[in-house]
Amino acid sequence: MANKGNKSNDNINTKDFLIGSLVGTLVGASLAFLFAPKSGKKLREDINKTALDFRDKTNEWKEVAYEKTDELKSYAKEQTANLQQVVNDKSQNLQDKYQGTKQSIQKKFNQAQDDLEDKKDEVVDKVDEVKKTAEKTVKETKKTAEKKAKAAKEASEKVKEAVEEAVEDVKDK
């Protein structure tokens, strides 16, 4: 989880660095042109050359921004896949536990039928107790699975929204 925060800070720092570099380049180039003792034609040539250089730098930065966006998309997809795998694993684990509990209850029920004539009252009490435990376990298992599925869906939506915002931010800049 701390790794996610570091990656986000790295992306913000990269963005801030790129913006700062762009502004610094523009200001420095503008000041150099204004204070340089050159003829009008030479100054226009220099401005034109600097504008072309600036355009090239901007294109490079745009490519970097696209690469970072692709990296963010890949990271979001990877995290979504990882989260989905965790949910699937947990669901399978819960289902296995449910099946195990169900089989255990079935065994106890069959055993209770064999001993019915000798211990009818005792068996009825135990079956009721096991049934309540199983129902409680099923309810808890279902609640847990629903909570985890909901959390996974929310996390996936948050990641999707973050990626969309990042894409919009990159497009806006």
Image (cartoon, rainbow, N blue to C red):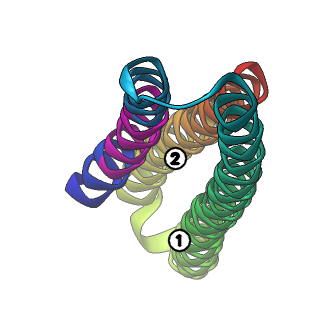
Is residue 35 shown to the viewer in this render?
A: yes
Is residue 105 shown to the viewer in this render?
A: no
Seen from the viewer's position, the closer of residues 136 and 153 is: 153
Q: Is residue 165 above or below residue 46?
A: above
Seen from the viewer's position, the closer of residues 159 and 145 is: 159
Q: Are marks 2 and 1 in contact (CB under 8 Å)?
A: yes
Can you identify the residue that label 2 sits on?
141
Q: Is residue 120 above or below residue 136?
A: below
Numbered circles on residues, count = 2
Residue bounds of the magenta highlight: 10-24
Label the magenta part by its dominant secondary structure. Answer: helix
In magenta stretch: residue 11: yes
| Residue 107, x across and y down, in percent | 58, 81
| Distance between the alpha carbons at the discs numbered 2 and 1 | 9 Å
Can you identify the residue that label 1 sits on?
97
In magenta stretch: residue 153: no
User: SS at mark 2?
Assistant: helix
Task: Indicate the quadrant where residue 23 lies.
Answer: top left
Amino acid residing under circle 2: Thr
